[in-house]
Amino acid sequence: DVKVTQSSRYLVKRTGEKVFLECVQDMDHENMFWYRQDPGLGLRLIYFSYDVKMKEKGDIPEGYSVSREKKERFSLILESASTNQTSMYLCASTRGTEAFFGQGTRLTVV
Amino acid sequence: EDQVTQSPEALRLQEGESSSLNCSYTVSGLRGLFWYRQDPGKGPEFLFTLYSAGEEKEKERLKATLTKKESFLHITAPKPEDSATYLCAVRKGGSYIPTFGRGTSLIVHP
């Protein structure tokens, strides 16, 4: 079975903190994604990566950056956390067909 | 612009009351339509991939079908444990990025 693991289920951070969300997949997938999910807005793509050290902006990249130094790991960085970044964050990976998701990280910024 | 629209937004059923969820899409060169189940506070769980009109896939009480413009997720004799949000996504040719609908929240009452 494909496994996508996110480093934390729940996080509480203070406004202005730098926040790192980590995601690891074990299926040698080339493509990895970060989404945020908010009630009524569905899944929105923040960033994606199609190879090591390669990254592309999604629909809502402002306030975020990413890092992919190894194929299996894709990190989402909130440079200076703000309350409007309180959300559920979902990581996914795919070889090009269906995407597989991690369990999600519920981030609260206070 | 690629669009995925799911209906209804919410659906309440009695246990055993069969129904269908709809996913209509506009995308050029469909390369896959995907159904996911998402439980509260968790990441989406992959259910099915459909590639061409006329294709059908089944899993327990769920059956997914595909036409050139829409897909249906049929739920036969649902049980309370089928309660979840069901997400639909499509991928078009030349892109590995899935476009998601906003989901249908299903509640099955005992």
Image (cartoon, grey):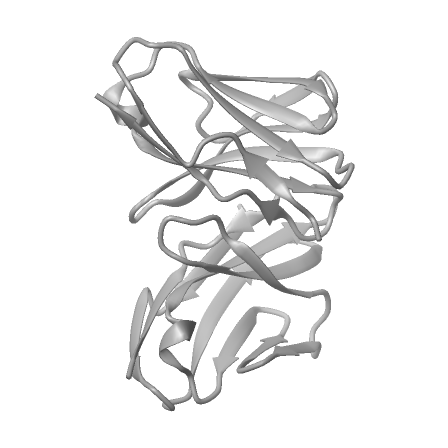
A24 vs B107, nearest the viewer: A24
Residue at the image point whose x is 50% and y is 51% from the top: B100
Q: Is residue A106 left or right of residue A84?
A: right
Residue B23, image x, y percentages = 49, 66
Q: Is residue A80 left or right of residue B29?
A: left
- Residue A59 drawn above or below residue B44: above
Q: Is residue A90 left or right of residue A87?
A: right
Residue A75 location, quadrant: top right
Residue A31, image x, y percentages = 70, 35
Residue at the image point whose x is 71% and y is 76% from the top: B55
Residue B35 location, quadrant: bottom right
Residue B90, image x, y percentages = 60, 55
Residue at the image point whose x is 58% and y is 37% from the top: A5
Point out the image quarter for the C terminus of chain B: bottom left
* Residue B27 visible in the snapshot: no
Q: Is residue A97 left or right of residue B13?
A: right
* Residue A10 visible in the snapshot: yes
- Residue A46 drawn above or below residue B20: above
- Residue B21 drawn above or below residue A5: below
Residue at the image point whose x is 29% and y is 29% from the top: A86
- Residue B71 drawn above or below residue A38: below
Q: Residue furthest right?
A: A28
Q: Residue furthest left?
A: A110
Residue A74, image x, y percentages = 62, 25
B33 vs A14, nearest the viewer: A14
